[in-house]
Amino acid sequence: MKSKIFLYLFIFVSLICLYLFVSNGNMVKVKDARIDKLEGQIEQLRDSVRDTQLKVLEMQYFSLENNDDALAYYDHLELEDPSRYIADKLLETNESKGDNPLVPYEGMDSDFKINKIKVLNHKWILTDFSDGKYWGELLIKYELKDDLSVDFTMLDHLLYTRSE
């Protein structure tokens, strides 16, 4: 009787060990498949980050901050961030009552104001303006003088039509 109990116990333990061995093998396969999938996703994300970095570098090509030759024109002024200073001076033109004086259109919904500014180099600025419903862009020539005043001259403009 005692030997049958040990035999049944041995068979029971053997079945448990066999079950654990098989289920552990299946878990390893599932985890390996998951790891491979995650590694593939990581590689895709790395490629995406690399592409995004290249796009950012491409977009920064035309900017005052990355143009040492253009920045050399402002070395004697000792401005910490000439691009930000010029953008701030341009935004000050929005403070006038009514439309921005650089925008050659009259606002239809409200007053046209300059929204976004891209200082291209030591001479040109590209801006976006809007009245909330209609929008357009300006190409502006500027001159930063030694007394830190800035003269703006609108070179070209466009107003987008609304497609409704």
Image: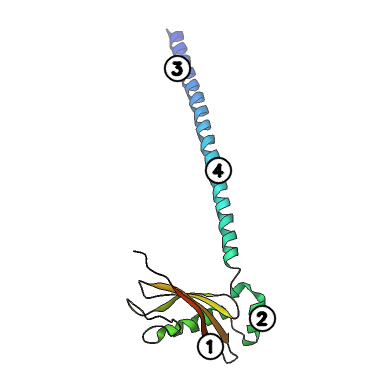
Q: Dot 4: what SS?
A: helix
Q: Is residue 21 visible?
A: yes
Binning the other alpha carbons within 10 Å of mark 1 as few (below 14), some (14 to 19) or many (20 upward) gives some
Binning the other alpha carbons within 10 Å of mark 4 as few (below 14), some (14 to 19) or many (20 upward) gives few
Instruction: Report, in whole angstroms, how far the alpha carbon at label 3 lies from the one at label 1.
Output: 92 Å
Binning the other alpha carbons within 10 Å of mark 3 as few (below 14), some (14 to 19) or many (20 upward) gives few
Residue at position x 50%, y 20% in the image: 18
* Residue at numbered disc 1: 151
Q: Quadrant of the N terminus?
A: top left
* Residue at numbered disc 2: 72
- Outermost residue, bottom side: 147
| Residue type, label 1 | Asp
* Residue at numbered disc 3: 12
- Outermost residue, top side: 1
**Viewer-nearest of discs 4 and 2:** 2
Residue at position x 43%, y 85% in the image: 101
Q: Is residue 81 visible?
A: no
| Residue type, label 4 | Gly
For this view, does 70 lie left or right of residue 129? Answer: right
For this view, does 53 lie left or right of residue 93? Answer: right
Q: Dot 1: what SS?
A: strand
Dot 4 and dot 3 residues touching (CB under 8 Å): no
